[in-house]
Image (cartoon, rainbow, N blue to C red):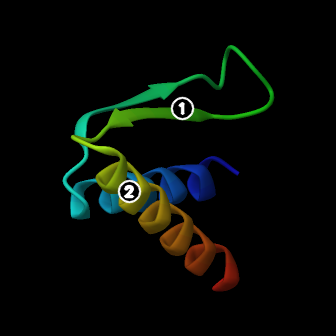
Amino acid sequence: MEHTSKKLLQVVLDACEDKLAQEVVALDVASLTPVAEYFVITHGKNEKQVQAIVDAVDRKSTRLNSSH
């Protein structure tokens, strides 16, 4: 599970970088909750950029899940 989570985290971070997300922070919350291993916080300059970040993360993470 850990390997898959790290791979997904990298996909999310790459998608954020591709869309020029600002102040991207990845928190390791595995010891705090059974729901998630990582929590990513970021923002964009405007609503259109934020939506582009969301779409990129969704598209790339879906692609990763369909390849397994």
Q: Quadrant of the C terminus?
A: bottom right
Q: Quadrant of residue 26?
A: top left
Q: Nearer the viewer, mark 2 or mark 1?
A: 2
Disc 2 target residue: 53
The residue at the point 23 percent across, 64 percent down is 18
Say what secondary structure mark 2 lies in: helix
Position of 15 with respect to 6 (left or right) is left
In the rendered image of this protein, does residue 23 appear above or below residue 47? above
* Numbered disc total: 2
The amino acid at mark 2 is Ile
Disc 1 target residue: 39
Task: Give residue 15's position: percent from left, percent from top.
Answer: 35, 62
Q: Residues within 10 Å of mark 1 (few under 14, many from 20)?
A: few
Q: How far is the residue under mark 2 from the one under mark 1?
A: 15 Å
Residue at the front extreme of this rendering:
47
Position of 9 with respect to 46 (left or right) is right
In the rendered image of this protein, does residue 57 appear above or below residue 44? below
